[in-house]
Amino acid sequence: MAIVRWDPFGEVLRMQRDMDRIFSRLGSAEVGGESVAWMPKVDVKRKDDDIVVRAELPGIDPADVDVEVTDGVLTIRGERKQEEKQEGEDWLVCESCYGSFERSLTIPDGVDPASITADYKDGILMVHVPKALEAARPKTTKIEIGSSAGAPELEGAQE
């Protein structure tokens, strides 16, 4: 049996993927005149010690997208606006999703939010979180064992 180091960030990402899979099965449509929420697809990859979040936002104006970090949670939110119907037009099939969306991912403690950057090109939002995996690594401090000179005596210790 191998000993495997626990990766809390990996666990959160796995849970996020599972939840995305569950919600993606629900689909998105207009039910009873009310729009059902949708979420853009998000990929998260490691690049050295950095994390790169890639969100698919086709047809969305970058001005309608907000990216922010609050208390260690990276949030991408925005809105895809539905096309205005023109006179004499009716949809025969409409599978596109419209409306507001929000995606949130926990980032490791120790990441400087001011160092996070985002770029938007061809409907793809790329959020770069530098040194995120470095911040998530367990910190180990080696304690040297030295002489007991100057150390407080332990109660009940016998010589």
Image (cartoon, helix red, strand yellow):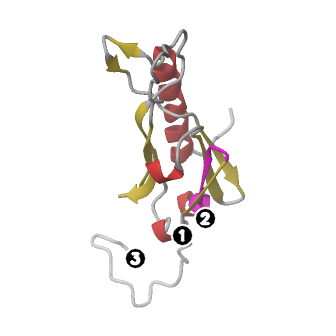
Q: In 3D space, how far apart are the residues under numbered discs 1 and 3 (Cα atoms)?
A: 55 Å
Give the x, y percent position of residue 63. 48, 53
Outermost front residue: 87
Outermost right residue: 48
Quadrant the C terminus occupies = bottom left
**Quick check: 60 above or below 96?**
below
Residue 131 circle label = 2
Mark found first going from the N terminus, 2 or 3: 2
Give the x, y percent position of residue 106. 45, 49
Element type at mark 3: loop
Q: Is the residue under label 1 in contact with that under label 2 (CB below 8 Å)?
A: yes
- Report which residue position mark 3 lands on: 159
Question: Along the line of sight, which residue is nearer the eye, 105 or 5?
Answer: 105
Element type at mark 2: loop
Give the x, y percent position of residue 1. 68, 32
Please provide the residue range marked out in magenta. 122-133
Q: In 3D space, how far apart are the residues under numbered discs 2 and 1 (Cα atoms)?
A: 9 Å
Residue 73 circle label = none
